[in-house]
Amino acid sequence: MNRRNFIECSAAGALALPLAAQEPKLPRKAMPLEIALPDGTKLNTSRYAGKVCVVEFLFTTCSHCQEASRHLSALNREFGARGLQPVGAAFNEGAMMLVPGFVKEYNVNYPVGVVSREKVLEYLALSTMTRLTVPLVAFLDRRGNVRYQSNPVGTEALHSEQRMRQIVEELIKEPAAKKS
C-alpha cells in the first residue's frame, strides 16, 4: 500500500465537508446494522452476538478497501472457527451492482452487502458533516461493544494485517457475555 494510493482512496472517500472529526467514545455498545445483500436478503449484524465481529465499511473500487478485505478474509480463514465474523458494507455509488464482482475478484469469504452513507455515520457515531476516508473498520467484542474503529479522516492505524491480527487475537481470547 503506497502513500499515493492511500491519498487517492482518501480523496474518493471524502464525501462531506472537511470538518474536524470528534472522536467517538470507545468502547460503546454497537447498534444493530442492517446490510442489504446482492441477492435481495438483509443481514443484521446483531445475528453475530457472542462472536468477534469486524465490520468493514468500504468502496468496492478502492485499492485500500480491497487490501483490507484480503486481510479480513485471511483472518477469517484462521480465526472463523474460533468466533471471528467479518462483514463488509459497501457504500460507494453503484455498490449493489459492484459487490458480486468485488467478492469474486478479491476472494472475499464473508458476507458483503450495501448500506447508505447515513448508516455508516450513525453506526460509527460520527457527525453528518464528518469527512470520511475508506476503508473504515469497526471491531466488536463478543459482548457487542465497538472496541476499536478507524479514524474517519484517514490513518492506516487499523488497516494493516498485523494490527488487525493483534486486535482479533485480543478480542477472541475474551469470553462472551454470560446469559442471565
Image (cartoon, helix red, strand yellow):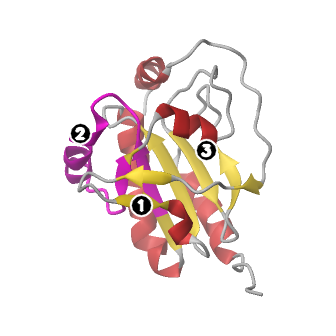
Task: Name the residue: 67% across, 33% down.
Answer: 126
Alpha carbon separation for disc pair 2 and 3 = 22 Å
Quadrant holding the C terminus? bottom right
The answer to whether 125 is drawn above or below residue 30 in the figure is: above
Does the magenta run of residues contain 96?
yes
Residue under label 3 = 123
Frontmost of labels 2 and 3 is 3
149 vs 134, left or right, is: right
Given residues 150 and 179, the one toward you in this image is: 179
Give the SS element for disc 1.
strand
Expressed as whole percent of the image width and height from the top left, the position of residue 78 reads 44, 72
Q: Earlier in the sequence, mark 3 or mark 1?
A: 1
* Image quadrant in which you'd find residue 59: top left
Residue under label 1 = 43
94 vs 35, left or right, is: left
Q: Amino acid at mark 1?
A: Leu
- How many residues crowd mark 1 within 10 Å: few (<14), some (14–19), many (20+)? some
Q: Earlier in the sequence, mark 2 or mark 3?
A: 2
Q: Earlier in the sequence, mark 2 or mark 1?
A: 1
Frontmost of labels 2 and 1 is 1
